Amino acid sequence: MTAFDIPADLDPIEYARKAGEMARAQVPNIESQEPATLPQLTRDDLLEMSPAEINEAHANGQFSQMLGLI
């Protein structure tokens, strides 16, 4: 961690800004990723799914699609 000089008359807001800049400089850049493409569910898929699979589909954001199949 890189240290920076803290002047005695530095107010807390300016200190927080400098600390934030220092922390931001140490974080590696993260490239954006495309969202995963989820498979389209059919009514037959829904009827064959176990409760655990239904919960997983709900967690993956497919709940509104599942409601349209009922």
Image (cartoon, helix red, strand yellow):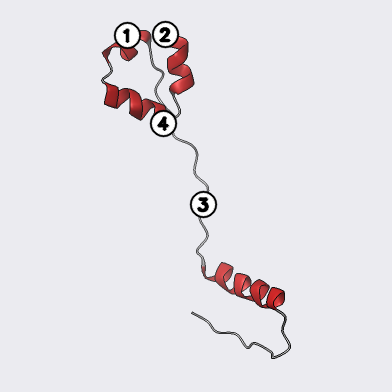
Dot placed on the residue nearer the N-terminal end, 1 or 2: 1
Dot 1: what SS?
A: helix
Dot placed on the residue nearer the N-terminal end, 1 or 3: 3
Dot 3: what SS?
A: loop
Label 2 Cα crowd, 10 Å radius (few <14 / some 14-19 / many 20+): few
- Give the mark toward the camera: 4 or 3: 4
Tell me: residue 5, above or below residue 23. Answer: below
Mark 4 lies on residue: 60
Residue beneath the point at 46% across and 18% down:
65
Q: Nearer the viewer, residue 24 or 33?
A: 24
* Amino acid type assigned to the residue bearing label 3 in the image: Glu
Residue beneath the point at 42% across and 16% down:
66
The residues tagged by marks 1 and 3 sit, at their Cα atoms, a distance apart of 38 Å
The residues tagged by marks 1 and 4 sit, at their Cα atoms, a distance apart of 19 Å
Dot placed on the residue nearer the N-terminal end, 4 or 3: 3
The residues tagged by marks 4 and 3 sit, at their Cα atoms, a distance apart of 22 Å
Mark 3 lies on residue: 31
Tell me the tag on residue 70: 2
* Amino acid type assigned to the residue bearing label 4 in the image: Asn
- Give the mark toward the camera: 4 or 2: 2
Quadrant into which the C terminus falls: top left
The residues tagged by marks 4 and 2 sit, at their Cα atoms, a distance apart of 18 Å
Place of residue 11 in the rendered image (x, y in percent of width and height, measured from the top left): 72, 80
Tell me: residue 48, above or below residue 18. Answer: above
What residue occupies the far front of the structure in this picture?
12
- In the displayed structure image, the side of residue 47 where residue 65 appears, left or right: right
Label 3 Cα crowd, 10 Å radius (few <14 / some 14-19 / many 20+): few
Dot placed on the residue nearer the N-terminal end, 1 or 4: 1
Mark 1 lies on residue: 44
Check contact, mark 3 vs mark 2: CB within 8 A: no
Dot 2: what SS?
A: loop
